[in-house]
Image: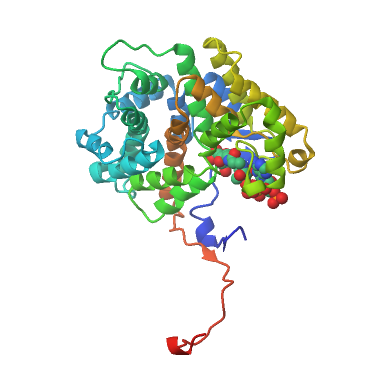
């Protein structure tokens, strides 16, 4: 039994099941996508190649990759009416609230890729999700700051295109910084998939009924938004800004240990990793690279994060509970250095995780053993009893 319900075979065969996509060894801190170590993919691959690997199971040949990238680029534009959805939000709407709404709205537009049980429609849905979610995410930022939407430019790579849609304006030329674009490709790769986390399980359970794929991905976005999950990257930055000075680190460590007002050290701990999250180590390295490129080696928040990690990992509480930095501990520092606001961090996590959610949704719905998820609960309520008329109740 886990939490509120016991897994029954029907549930296990659908939502939290055997999968061949991502392998994690939490004790050793290992993470493999289709058997390839995350360290090698982060170093040598790019995001669309990793998306191909997650969805198709193998690294693409040069020809397969070129075809895959060109098909994604055919779908980067949004139906023009979709831009109207943004104007229904307040200007200060959180980007994740916008993404839940607009990605969900894709189910009202792209009806020739909505039948989950039609393999051809599933493929188009996958391409549309990979192609359009970055545009939807970037436009939620543009809407927040009152700047015009920038349309995707297919001459750019995936990460360059995202930087363009985030930071270009119609008034002047914009050329993405190649070092930042490379770092962003790596950040997307690190976030692409992670086995049966809360949001991937949400997509599997929602998708198990044969529901519209875009609506299922919107459900995953909603789950990821929580501060205990993908929302932790934004919460970590907010926490570091609240700590402000190395002299206050001890105060926050004690709050976490005493569980004062249920405070937790954001970016620390993990349900599966009882060792360093391999993604955190790569993210720390990426921090160094990006800050160096931007001449921000003395970034006070990065220094604070390094110090906090050191102090926490020397503290008995964290050592005994095997609480290490996770993927969210350093990612916000990198993205903030790139000029990305805290409120966009989880939207970028969702953008990248769309590859893993899509791969897991396709694996689940295409499985010959596919069944609708129907978990049972462990009933702990009152035994049978008879109705009491209201005038007899005390
Ligand atoms: C992600 O599942 C995934 O794979 C998720 C993810 C992915 O790629 O999809 O890896 C992405 O969500 C990473 C996690 C981001 N969240 C945070 O950084 C938020 C802070 N972390 C914690 O809330 C917590 O560590 C969780 C939610 C991540 C894990 O929760 P668990 O495994 O249920 O841990 P727990 O609550 O059972 O904690 C065990 C003990 C508890 O103390 P006791 O009850 O035993 O006394 O450790 C303590 C917790 O209070 N603890 C912490 C802590 N994390 C756990 N104490 C202080 N600070 C923390 N961060």
* Total numbered circles: 0
Rendered image quadrant of residue 146: top left
Residue 187 percent coordinates (x, y): 51, 26
Instruction: Return the residue nearer the eye: 237 or 346.
Output: 237
Residue 188 percent coordinates (x, y): 48, 28
Residue at x 36% of width, y 29% of height: 141
Classify residue 259 as left or right of residue 144.
right
Instruction: Return the residue nearer the eye: 263 or 183.
Output: 263
Residue at x 33% of width, y 43% of height: 101
Classify residue 26 as left or right of residue 44.
right
Which quadrant of the picture is home to ligand 1? top right
Rendered image quadrant of residue 135: top left
Q: Is residue 64 above or below residue 200?
A: above
Classify residue 324 as left or right of residue 193.
right
Question: Looking at the image, what colour scheme do you see?
Answer: rainbow
Residue at x 31% of width, y 20% of height: 154
Q: Is residue 367 above or below residue 300?
A: below
Residue 311 percent coordinates (x, y): 74, 30
Residue 227 percent coordinates (x, y): 53, 42
Instruction: Return the residue nearer the eye: 200 or 240.
Output: 240
Q: Which part of the image, by quadrant, shows the N terminus?
A: bottom right
Residue 33 seen from this side: no
Q: Is residue 101 above or below residue 285?
A: below
Classify residue 263 as left or right of residue 70.
right
Residue at x 35% of width, y 17% of height: 156
Residue 69 seen from this side: yes
């Amino acid at each position: 039994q886990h939490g509120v319900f016991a897994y029954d075979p029907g549930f296990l065969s659908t939502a939290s099941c055997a999968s061949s996509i991502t392998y994690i060894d939490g004790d050793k801190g290992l993470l493999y996508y289709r058997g390839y170590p995350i360290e090698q993919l982060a170093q040598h691959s790019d995001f669309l190649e990793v998306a191909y690997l997650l969805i198709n199971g193998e690294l693409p040949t040069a020809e397969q990759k070129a075809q895959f990238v060109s098909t994604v680029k055919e779908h980067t534009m949004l139906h023009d009416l979709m831009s109207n959805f943004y104007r229904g939000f307040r200007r200060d709407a959180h980007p994740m609230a916008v993404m839940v709404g607009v990605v969900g709205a894709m189910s009202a537009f792209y009806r020739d890729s909505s039948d989950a049980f039609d393999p051809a429609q599933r493929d188009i849905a996958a391409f549309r999700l990979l192609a359009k979610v970055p545009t939807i995410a970037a436009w939620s930022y543009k809407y927040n700051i009152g700047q015009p939407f920038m349309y995707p430019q297919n001459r750019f790579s995936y990460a360059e295109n995202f930087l363009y849609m985030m930071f270009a304006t119609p008034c002047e030329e914009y050329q993405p910084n190649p070092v930042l674009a490379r770092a962003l490709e790596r950040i997307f790769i690190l976030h692409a998939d992670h086995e049966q986390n809360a949001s991937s399980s949400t997509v599997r359970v929602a998708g198990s009924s044969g529901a519209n794929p875009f609506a299922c991905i919107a459900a995953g976005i909603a789950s990821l938004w929580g501060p205990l999950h993908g929302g932790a990257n934004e919460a970590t930055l907010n926490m570091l800004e609240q700590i402000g000075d190395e002299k206050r680190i001890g105060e926050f460590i004690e709050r976490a240990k005493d569980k004062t007002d249920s405070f937790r050290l954001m970016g620390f701990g993990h349900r599966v990793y009882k060792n360093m999250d391999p993604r955190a180590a790569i993210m720390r390295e990426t921090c160094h690279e990006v800050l160096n490129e931007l001449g921000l080696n003395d970034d006070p928040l990065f220094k604070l994060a390094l110090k906090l990690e050191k102090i926490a990992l020397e503290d008995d509480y964290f050592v005994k509970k095997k609480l290490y930095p996770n993927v969210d501990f350093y990612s916000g520092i990198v993205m903030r250095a790139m000029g990305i606001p805290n409120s966009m961090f989880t939207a970028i996590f969702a953008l990248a995780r769309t590859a893993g959610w899509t791969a897991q949704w396709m694996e689940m719905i295409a499985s010959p053993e596919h069944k609708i998820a129907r978990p049972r609960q462990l009933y702990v309520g009152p035994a049978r009893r008879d109705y009491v008329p209201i005038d007899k109740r005390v």
